[in-house]
Image (cartoon, helix red, strand yellow):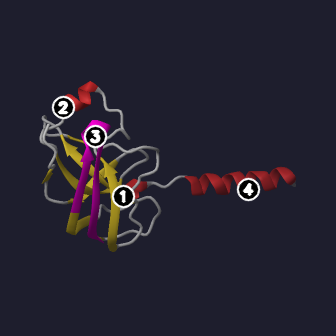
Amino acid sequence: MRKLGISIALLALAGCASTNYSDFDVSEAVISKLKINETHNLNERQHKLEISFDYEISEYVDTNNLYNCSVQFLALDGTTISMSNGKKSPCELNKAKGKKSIVWPTILDKAHSPSEEQLSKIKYPIEYFVAIHQRTGKNTNRIIGKSAIQVSTVKI
């Protein structure tokens, strides 16, 4: 009987542990009322973006960890780079619409340790945008909405 109870518990946990994100239709998102305050002291390797915005996600699916936001920095080759510490997104979105405020260290901030290669690929002056993502797999996501491109006030 004890083995049966353990087996049922393991099956229940296994069923709850994985979400097949590809089963969800891809939503669309809109970012509005974007406000950014840029703070920096490059002598101390401090460069942060204080960001606030309103957002709305159409075709919203109420599932944990499905939507998040990030700041994407433009690279010279047309791709983007985003950095954050830890495995959990610092900008989870768990409602169909709302307001979000985040402080995002840029690639120049001491919170990150970008490689020389990463720094050499970034566009200067730094250009960036706020993006809303929808997870499409365990380690993949898709941008479903983004702000206009912003240009940093930092001159290097």
Determine crowd level at label 3: few under 14, some 14-19, many 20+ residues with C-alpha closer than 10 A: many
- Point out the tag, 1 or 3, that comes first from the N-terminus: 1
Mark identifier at residue 89: none
The residue that mark 4 highlights is: 8
Q: CA distance from mark 3 to mark 4?
A: 47 Å
- Point out the tag, 2 or 1, that comes first from the N-terminus: 1
**92 and 141: which is toward the camera:** 92
SS at badge 4 = helix
Q: Does 69 appear in magenta?
A: no
SS at badge 3 = loop
SS at badge 1 = strand
The residue that mark 3 highlights is: 107
Q: Are marks 2 and 1 in contact (CB under 8 Å)?
A: no
Q: Are marks 4 and 2 in contact (CB under 8 Å)?
A: no
Determine crowd level at label 1: few under 14, some 14-19, many 20+ residues with C-alpha closer than 10 A: some
Q: CA distance from mark 1 to mark 4?
A: 33 Å
Image position, residue 115 (x, y; %): 30, 27
Please say if 46 is above or below 118.
below
The residue that mark 2 highlights is: 121
**24 and 103: which is toward the camera:** 103
Image position, residue 80 (x, y; %): 21, 42
Amino acid type of the residue that numbered disc 2 sits on in the rendered structure: Lys
**22 and 112: which is toward the camera:** 112
Image quadrant where one finds the N terminus: bottom right
**56 and 76: which is toward the camera:** 76
Image quadrant where one finds the C terminus: top left
Please say if 64 is above or below 46.
below
The residue that mark 1 highlights is: 68
Q: CA distance from mark 1 to mark 3?
A: 19 Å
Q: Which residues are magenta?
A: 36-57
- Point out the tag, 1 or 4, that comes first from the N-terminus: 4
